[in-house]
Amino acid sequence: MDSGIKVAVVGLGFGASWVATYLDHPAVAEVAICDPDADLRARVAERHGIEAAFESYDDLLRTGRYDAAHLLTPIPLHVEQTLAALDAGVHCACAIPMAMSIADLERVVAAQDTSSAVYMLMETAVYSNSALYVRDLAESGALGELQFLRCAHYQNMEGWPDYWKDLPPMYYSTHALGPVLAVAGRPAASVQCLGSGRLPDDLLGDYDSPSPVQTALVRLEDSPVVCEVTRCLFQMTRGFQERFDVYGDRMAFEWPQIDGEDPVVFRVESGPLPPGRRSRPTSVERATLPDFADRVPEELRGHIRGGTAGNFRPHMVHEFVSAVLDRRFPAIDARVAANWTAVGICAHESTMNDGASVPIPTFGA
Ligand SMILES: NC(=O)c1ccc[n+]([C@@H]2O[C@H](COP(=O)([O-])OP(=O)(O)OC[C@H]3O[C@@H](n4cnc5c(N)ncnc54)[C@H](O)[C@@H]3O)[C@@H](O)[C@H]2O)c1
């Protein structure tokens, strides 16, 4: 791979927005695209000057030419396409969700274990400026001891492809959960979840899931900390947000109510409580987030964006490409991804059992 790796971007809806970042990565020698939609394929190929444009994913893998594939295809295709890549020794980055059942999560983890290639879940929220900022606060000790986590993903999926109809909201919850589980640095252990609201008849589909909203409490492994997570897909009046709040005993971070505003940080004085005082003074201020441009190669700095939610593409492309080159597991490898994704699947099981606690499987050693 001296002259760089060859990457295929598969699925050109959301996927089209990743092509330029791969093309600019200094360790990427070649980018191919793949989509059965001929017009879309032609448009993306022309826009980026790409010669290798495949109609069929199987044909693309059969060339044996590509070191890595980034899958941004419809949700029901993720598992089989991931397994096909890993079985062919092709490194695989995949858009969320990793899978829709525990059995399929186990299949992908097993495939990563036996493949010469690596898997990365492209959980974009984990690479927002806010998530990078709070991870730094946690690692530096500035938050103090972690006490509570809260996160949510509000989105209205009316008009989106049919596979979204009555999808259990928690099946697509890693945009909320990923950043806080990454900050906590430990896996989820169990979950209790309830459904809320009523899905109208025309949105009922294949999943037999009656609620447009689900809200859950997640226990973390070997930790007293609990995470509260809410996910809605339809019917709830709320503008789009993927958000999280993190509370330590020294400092806390809260996502702004409206995207585009700066987040809020709270701090308390350390040391013994002065005599006669009831509670500690708490300061509150808006934080200006860094853009973390120094963490990606110079060639990708033109893709860096400021703000609370943005910025994930250059960091994620760099992490995936670096993992391939360094022959190491990426930060969100199959085992980490399976734990995060399983929370949503187990949460739905809990919902259908009136909020019973459901343990998260461990996915092997
Ligand atoms: N922030 C995020 O992480 C984020 C944001 C948007 C979408 N997504 C995920 O990315 C994926 C793509 O989202 P989308 O809204 O573009 O989906 P989509 O359903 O609109 O389809 C994307 C493209 O995949 C193509 N496609 C269909 N079958 C294919 C196949 N067999 N091989 C190759 N391409 C195929 C379609 O023609 C389409 O152009 C989804 O899994 C979605 O969940 C993630």
Image (cartoon, grey):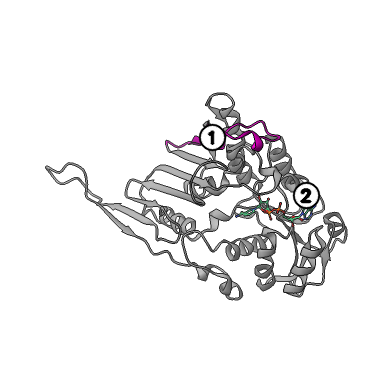
Quarter of the figure that contains the N terminus: bottom right
Residue 337 in the image: state x and y as whole percent.
62, 46
Q: Is residue 196 left or right of residue 285?
A: right
Determine whether 131 is above or below 158 in the image. below
Give the residue at mark 2: 81
Between the residue at mark 1 and the residue at mark 2, the CA separation in whole angstroms equals: 28 Å
Residue 206: name its quadrant.
top right
Q: Quadrant of the C terminus?
A: top right
Front position in the image: 204 or 181: 204
296 to the left or right of 183: right
Q: Identify the image quadrant of residue 71.
A: bottom right
Q: Earlier in the sequence, mark 1 or mark 2?
A: 2
Identity of the residue drawn at 51% across and 70% down: 293
Label 1 or label 2, whichever lies nearer to me, is 2
* Callout 2 amino acid: Gln
| Disc 1 secondary structure class | strand
Few, some or many C-alpha atoms within 10 Å of disc 1 (few <14, some 14-19, many ≥20)? some
Residue carrying label 1: 189
Question: Residue at the location (72% across, 45% down)?
Answer: 113
Relative to the observer, which residue lies in front, 251 or 273?
A: 251
The answer to whether any part of residue 1 appears in the image is: no
